[in-house]
């Protein structure tokens, strides 16, 4: 102890009050910061201590600078709930986390190892995995999350078209017709129906390409097609007709515009395009069955067997029209 005191005095002999250390006004305790000492030993808050000793420092200059530099590097997560918008705050906090933590390779590695450990322990049970899955579904369903992911995907698609084609479009188009796992129930049922008709070779998820398509890929996916006979079948769901919110108005306009361009392409090439609207499909959980209206299937079969070029529309959503577009005037109407 004596040796320690001698060495300590020698090491501290060049230190200066206020710069390297401060002194407690009650018990003469020396230290760099007095906050914890005042609270634990004397039971006072900083404000109470300063009222008794207004001229005493509670932190030395060196420590104050060190903590200040640290706060610049470490963002504050505190929020004044009365003034801040939560969505804006969450966005800003995410950016700060990305800058302060995720940009650090060592921190990313540590987090990755922690997650692996979490998967092997806490999330190893089916119950906890189910809870995590439900929480993720709720988060993904939030409108602001959907909008954010949609914007990110659109930006990535625009900046990296080749990667998008390889990782998304090509894999989607590679879906085998005998295993249409990602198609909707109505599309699967339409496909099953046309498969029963003799003399056709229908396949799922076919693509047409045309210079008249003014988007980057110039490709348009069609649900079902027999290209050898020049026949294409599209199931048009609610997103082709309904405006679900003002925010989706531009998307609906674009979907309908692309539908018209596809119609014009089919007419120009002398092909057959049959559109079926979603109102022709019935799915009842109470009855426990799903089906297309028989009148719809009869019309579809008749058009296929007749095989006359044109664009045919089956369903009340097309203004209850069952029409064939094959005149110059109608071709102009479709394109407009």
Image: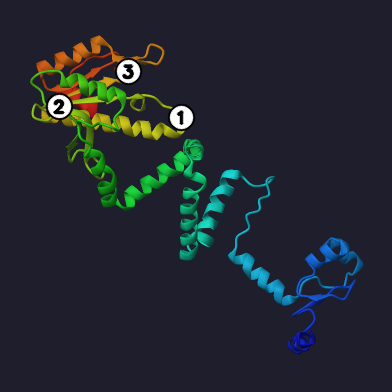
Residue at numbered disc 3: 317
What SS does tag 1 mark? loop
On-image quarter of the C terminus: top left
In terms of image quadrants, where is residue 151? top left
Q: Residue at x 23, y 21 (%)?
A: 190
Q: Is residue 225 visible?
A: yes
Residue 156 percent location from the top left of the image: 35, 50
At label 1, counting other C-alpha atoms closer than 10 Å, the crowd grade (few under 14, some 14-19, many 20 or more) is few
Could you give the CA–CA distance between mark 2 and mark 1, rounded to whole angstroms? 36 Å
Q: Residue furthest right?
A: 52
Residue at numbered disc 2: 202
Q: Is residue 325 visible?
A: no
* Marked residue nearer the N-terminal end (3 or 1): 1
Nearer to us of marks 2 and 1 is 2
What SS does tag 3 mark? helix
Q: Residue at x 30, y 33 (%)?
A: 182
Is 101 on the left-hand or right-hand side of 75?
left
* Marked residue nearer the N-terminal end (2 or 3): 2
Residue 93 percent location from the top left of the image: 56, 53
């Amino acid at each position: 102890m004596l040796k320690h005191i001698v060495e300590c005095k020698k090491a501290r002999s060049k230190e200066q009050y206020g710069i390297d250390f401060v002194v407690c006004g009650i018990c003469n305790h020396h230290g760099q910061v007095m906050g914890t000492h005042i609270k634990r030993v004397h039971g006072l808050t900083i404000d109470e201590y300063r009222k008794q000793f207004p001229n005493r420092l509670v932190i030395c200059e060196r420590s104050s600078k060190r903590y200040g530099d640290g706060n610049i590097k470490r963002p504050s997560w505190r929020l004044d709930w009365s003034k801040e918008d939560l969505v804006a705050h969450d966005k800003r906090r995410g950016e700060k986390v990305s800058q302060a933590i995720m940009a650090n390779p060592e921190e990313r590695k540590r987090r990755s190892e922690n997650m692996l450990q979490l998967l092997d322990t806490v999330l190893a049970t089916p119950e906890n995995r189910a809870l995590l899955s439900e929480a993720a579904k709720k988060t993904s369903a939030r409108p602001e999350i959907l909008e954010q992911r949609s914007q990110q995907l659109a930006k990535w698609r625009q900046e990296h078209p080749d990667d998008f084609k390889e990782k998304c479009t090509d894999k989607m188009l590679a879906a085998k017709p005998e295993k249409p796992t990602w198609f909707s129930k109505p599309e699967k049922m339409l496909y099953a129906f046309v498969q029963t008709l003799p003399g056709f070779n229908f396949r799922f998820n076919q693509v047409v390409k045309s210079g008249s398509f003014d988007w980057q890929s110039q490709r348009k996916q069609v649900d079902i097609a027999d290209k050898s006979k020049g026949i294409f079948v599209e199931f048009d769901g609610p997103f082709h007709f309904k405006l679900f919110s003002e925010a989706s108005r531009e998307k609906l306009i674009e979907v309908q515009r692309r539908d018209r361009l596809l119609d014009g392409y089919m007419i120009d090439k002398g092909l057959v395009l049959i559109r079926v609207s979603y109102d022709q499909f019935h799915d009842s959980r109470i009855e426990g069955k799903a089906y297309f209206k028989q009148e719809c299937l009869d019309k579809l079969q008749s058009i296929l067997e007749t095989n006359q070029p044109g664009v045919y529309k089956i369903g009340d959503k097309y203004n209850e029209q069952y029409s064939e577009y094959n005149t110059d005037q109608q071709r102009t109407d479709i394109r407009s």
